[in-house]
Amino acid sequence: MSDKIILGIESSCDETGVGIVRLSDTGEITLLADQVASSVDQHARFGGVVPEVASRAHLEAMVPTMERALDESGLSLSNVDAIAVTCGPGLAGALLVGVSAAKAYAAALDVPLYGVNHLAGHVAADTLQHGALPSECLALLVSGGHTQLLKVEDLAGKITEIGSTIDDAAGEAYDKVARIIGLPYPGGPPIDKAAKQGNPTAIRFPRGLTGPRDPKFDFSFSGLKTAVARWVEAQESDGKPIPVDDVCASFQESVADVLTAKAVRAAKELGIGTLVISGGVAANSRLSGLAQERCAEAGIELRVPRPRLCTDNGAMIAALGAHLVAAGVRPSSLELPTDPGMPVDTVYV
Ligand code: KG4
Ligand code: ZN
């Protein structure tokens, strides 16, 4: 097999991503381009992603983002050997834009098309920075839409959910808490920054689903968000100022504590030696710091890709496509449907 060029398209939420990788005949995957256009500013005043606005922004950004990715790689469309695209899970209209574009490029170039799972893409992102995954690893996926613990035995097909959030995603909790205390959307970065000046033990916020009878590997962040809202309301009704830095640090401590405690416990109980953390919230300084401490104590190898690879991007979809090509997986049909609720154990369609 000679080198292959795989192009990845991502449009499941508010980022239009186009990535290009090279798959060498030895199976090595090299990142050649990673271009992202974000519509996040258009959603900021609503405090969350507005699906219709996101879909329209994808339509406008798709071709320019493709052109920038080709420029970055120094290649042209005629060099592309296969196309991978996120076909779920995600926002219905947003997914349709990416999948339609991918079908058009695949048909015009007469190359195979691979419809892939966005969540598996987040795990594949790590291989672009740290190389191939071990034969078995645990992935903690934390983003605005997802919070899941996954057992990954094979990126090209065997991913099992160990636990997930029963209500809000971790990133969603950051975004909602930011709104409560008057910080901008998306809430992760400003809360992370303010928390550095605050005291994480100032307020003891609850740790969701950590009671003895609670499910061991599922998460809940809705009660935490409500606890922050109630605490802030009580301060306000007493006429006291809101210590924003302390609220951020104490909230962030609860999120990081629960995520890392459950992930490390799962790795230990399942006898898995490697933890990968990915998704937008993986960029959080306290989450990675506490994960580092707890993994070191437990003798678990920790892999966290750089923030650019953690948030939504096309490079991770290209990387997952390259794994599928290397594994000899059959391509998708040009009738490939989108699946907004695609389950994580379906890596490709
Ligand atoms: O993976 P991502 O880019 O998009 C989704 O698929 O959702 O994740 C976005 C989420 C947002 O909720 C944002 O607030 C959160 O990631 N986020 C962070 C940080 N940077 C982004 N959360 C905590 N700390 C951060 N530094
Ligand atoms: Zn994502």
Image (tube, helix red, strand yellow):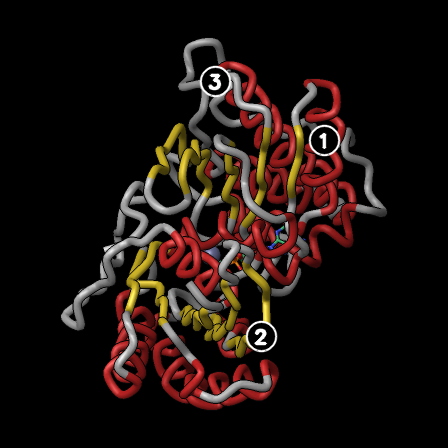
- The amino acid marked with disc number 2 is Ala
Residue 140 place in picture, x, y as percent: 52, 38
Residue 173 place in picture, x, y as percent: 53, 46
Q: Residues within 10 Å of mark 2 (few under 14, many from 20)?
A: many
**What number of labels is visible?**
3
Q: Mark 1 sits on what residue?
A: 203
Q: Is residue 237 above or below residue 51?
A: above
Label for residue 270?
Answer: 3
Give the residue at the far left of this rendering. 335
- The residue nearer to you, when weighing 2 against 167, is 2
- The amino acid marked with disc number 1 is Ile
In the image, ligand 1 is in what quadrant? bottom right
Residue 136 place in picture, x, y as percent: 48, 30
- The residue nearer to you, when weighing 307 against 124, is 124
- Mark 1 within 8 Å of ligand 1, using the beta carbon: no
The span from disc 1 to disc 3 (Cα, nearest Å) is 33 Å
Residue 13, image quadrant: bottom left
Q: Mark 2 sits on what residue?
A: 33
